[in-house]
Image (spheres, grey):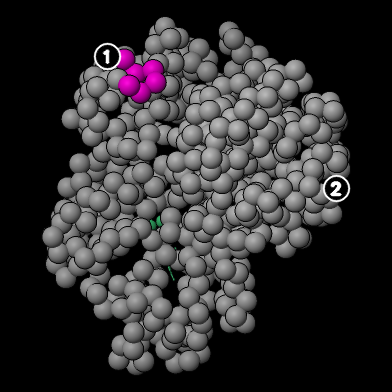
Amino acid sequence: MPNAEIARLLREVAELLELESANTFRVRAYSNAARVIEELPEAAATLSPERLHELPGIGDDLAGKIAEIAATGSLKLLRDLHREVPHAAVELLRVPGIGPKRARTLVDTLGIRSMAGLARAAKSGKLKALPGFGAAIEKKIISELAVHSGEEKRILRATAAQYGEALLEYMRALPGVRRAELAGSFRRGRETVGDLDLLVESSLGVEVSERFVKYPEVRAVLAKGPTRASVRLASGLQVDLRVLPAESYGAGLYYFTGSKAHNIAVRKMGQQRGLKINEYGVFKGKRSIGGRREQDVFDAVGLPWIPPELREDRGEIEAAGRGKLPKLVEYGDMRGDLQMHSTDSDGRDSLDAMAEAAQELGYEYIAITDHTPMLRIVNGLDRARFLLQRKRVDRLNARLRKLTVLAGAEVDIRADGSLDLDDETLESLDIVLVSLHSKFDLPKAGQTERILRAIRHPAVDIVAHPTGRLIGQRRGAGFDLERVAGAAADHGVMLEVNAQPTRLDLDDISCRAAIALGVTIAISTDAHSRDELRNMRWGVDQARRGWAAKGDVANTRPLKALLKLLHKGRR
Ligand code: DGT
Ligand code: CA
Ligand code: CA
Ligand code: ZN
């Protein structure tokens, strides 16, 4: 059972407890446990009770619950809660502006049972009169519903990876399965997936799809045939299976990797050469001339292999034809991580623990970038505390052998574009990140000016998570990317591709546009715990989709070369 599934069940308990107005500590214990399990590098289902106990915030009760999920796939507490709390209320909680109290009110007084029901009630003005609501809340709910309606349910890449990897392991355990891989948008590195597409190479017949539909997490079988099947997992994620023989595997992998637009363009090139390309192979008349390897498809149309991340029909076919494909950055190229938090602000691990974890990952350098005073809720540091932290960083560096820690900050950009830290302190830091944490909805012109002003400050090195979007939750700031990237390039300021699974900000298209304008990218995890340092791979995937080569990414450089890019080295 993947950690994501255990985490999902624990989070559901927390939500239902919240709706029951249970003790806040109890609610928080479950949501914390969900987070801890989700981030765990090893499979929680395989841990001994003693090891579970060692995890932060997991006591007897929670360890028992986790063991129960691992053993039975579900939880009695959750079944009981589902009997007590109306399910509709859980769904309503997902709307920003609706907390547990309001969700209960909507269900109890108006009998609302669905999102559609909520939308109707809001539009007919029934919400503002309810206790604890009001006109402003009603308006907010209407606009939130408008943002999210029509949006298909897509699952975050990092979550899909956990489900996908567990399923791959299960399928690979069947003797006769020679290869199993995820294709589709997942293989293309997309930040979210609509469903997973699982490809299996096997000469077995129906045994493969029979094993697939017996996967313990399958809740519904949507289709089942000898070489294909579709299921829905308990989490709601759909998985499509295709079984292919060795002679078609490469062509099938190519076809089901997509994107559809890319496939169609390549198939057309094949047609012009009198070839038919489909999921079974490349054909001249009735005769197969390839299909065993993915490269067979590219060979047929005279192209070099194109990395899956670029297969979107956004110019990659022309670039490949002219031999101008970028050599994309790889995870192994990363030499450091330039954004993370410690317990000094809102991180969960100490400065020393973060450094130790980074050393274990084999990094040459990291930047500690805690928050500034304006972000009071996260215990932002003021000048005095930054100076103290610097002393601790110096002592730490004297002790460390392989790793260099840069003393930095993630400085809040105020609404007028000024920075939330005095110039002298900014100057004293090795690295300065700036970012938006409020006022995401300023008009475009004002938002652009705000960021430009921050970029022009001589101490600034990186604009972190530039738009502030949260995937599926918050749209983020709207600004003129071309002007911002142009100014960043002129001032030697980098733009970040934030590797947190819910951020991945800049996104792929913006990353590519920024690089084309001469911007250097930094890929950073923004880790708030040692385990989150492992999120780097999601940022690398996003940057690859943004056509980033190793040379476009600052933290692929050795420390000395990196330092030359920073404000201190620029002068
Ligand atoms: P998703 O699931 O929405 O995140 O996106 P994909 O790209 O994984 O789309 P999906 O699961 O519908 O299909 C997987 C791949 O199969 C897709 O990327 C290309 C291929 N495919 C599906 N339908 C067609 C089609 O009608 N024509 C062609 N040429 N390819 C298709
Ligand atoms: Ca898919
Ligand atoms: Ca699919
Ligand atoms: Zn931030």
- Is the magenta region chiefly helix, strand or loop? loop
Q: Nearer the viewer, residue 512 or 391?
A: 391
Q: Return the residue nearer the eye: 321 or 267.
A: 321
Residue type, mark 1 in image? Asp
- Say which residue label 2 marks: 571
Is 116 placed above or below 265 here? above
Distance between the alpha carbons at the discs numbered 1 and 2: 57 Å
Task: Say left or right for 100 vs 569.
Answer: left
Residue 156 seen anywhere in this rendered image of the structure: no
Describe residue 291's horizontal placement relative to residue 100 as left or right: left
* Whole-percent x, y for residue 162 in the image: 36, 44
Mark 2, Cα crowd under 10 Å, few <14 / some 14-19 / many 20+, is few
Label 1 beta carbon less than 8 Å to ligand 4: no
In the displayed structure, would residue 421 be above or below residue 281?
A: above
State left or right for residue 544 relative to residue 4: right
The answer to whether 165 is drawn above or below residue 329 in the figure is: above
Is residue 294 located in the magenta-colored stretch of the structure?
no
Q: Is mark 1 on a helix, strand or loop?
A: helix
Circle 1/circle 2 CB separation < 8 Å: no
| Kind of residue indicated by mark 2 | Arg
Q: Which residue is drawn at 32% across and 60% down?
A: 181
Q: Where is residue 476 in the image (x, y as percent from the top left)?
A: 67, 38
The reply, left or right, for residue 505 in relation to residue 20 is right
- Magenta segment range? 54-59
Q: Is residue 162 visible?
A: yes
Q: In this view, does 444 lie above or below 316?
A: above
Q: What residue would you read off at disc 1?
A: 60
Instruction: Work out whether mark 1 precedes mark 2 in sequence or the reverse, and give the earlier one.
Output: 1
Of the pair 339 and 561, the residue shown nearer to us: 561
